[in-house]
Image: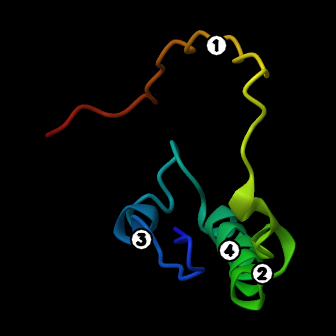
Amino acid sequence: MVNSDGVWHWKDEESFIAKIGDPAYWTRREADGIRAEAATVIGQIESGTGIFDGRWRRFVPNPAWPLPERLAAPPLRLPDRPPAT
């Protein structure tokens, strides 16, 4: 999570770690890829580059823009799991 002052911190770190290897979430390799992308974004946050260069702080959408239509939620499908013992 990035605060408006540019200070960042991990959010739900324990949950992310606990889901590594769970077939409904990500493999170790995918988790490593997520962390690598996070390192890139953290570099941008700390250097004030990319979308963190401050230009978006004063953005206000045009009030004449229409609101997008709300998409229907896809049906919830839980992964197959063995019964609890």
The residue indicated by pointer 2 is 44
Q: Nearer the viewer, residue 67 or 73?
A: 67
Tell me which amino acid carries mark 1: Leu
User: Which structural element holds mark 3?
Assistant: helix
Task: Where is residue 76? Give x, y as percent.
Answer: 47, 18
Q: Give the spatial CA distance, label 3 vs label 4.
A: 12 Å
Tell me which amino acid carries mark 2: Gln
User: Which structural element holds mark 2?
Assistant: helix
Task: Where is residue 19? Give x, y as percent.
Answer: 44, 58
User: Where 77 falls versus 55 (above or below)?
Assistant: above
Q: Nearer the viewer, residue 62 or 56?
A: 62
The residue indicated by pointer 3 is 13
User: Which structural element holds mark 1?
Assistant: loop
Tell me which amino acid carries mark 3: Glu
Q: Give the spatial CA distance, label 3 vs label 1.
A: 29 Å
Q: Give the spatial CA distance, label 1 vs label 2.
A: 32 Å
| Discs 2/4, front | 2
Work out whether mark 1 precedes mark 2 in sequence or the reverse, and give the earlier one. Answer: 2
Horizontally, is 24 left or right of 54 in the view?
Answer: left
Graded by Cα atoms within 10 Å as few (under 14), some (14 to 19) or many (20 or more), the crowding at tag 3 reads few
Q: Which residue is farthest right?
A: 50
Horizontally, is 1 left or right of 34 in the view?
Answer: left
Work out whether mark 4 precedes mark 1 in sequence or the reverse, and give the earlier one. Answer: 4
The residue indicated by pointer 4 is 38
The residue indicated by pointer 1 is 71
Graded by Cα atoms within 10 Å as few (under 14), some (14 to 19) or many (20 or more), the crowding at tag 2 reads some
**Residue at (51% x, 12% y) in the render:** 75
| Discs 3/1, front | 1
Work out whether mark 3 precedes mark 1 in sequence or the reverse, and give the earlier one. Answer: 3
Q: Which residue is farthest left?
A: 85
**Residue at (60% x, 68% y) in the render:** 28
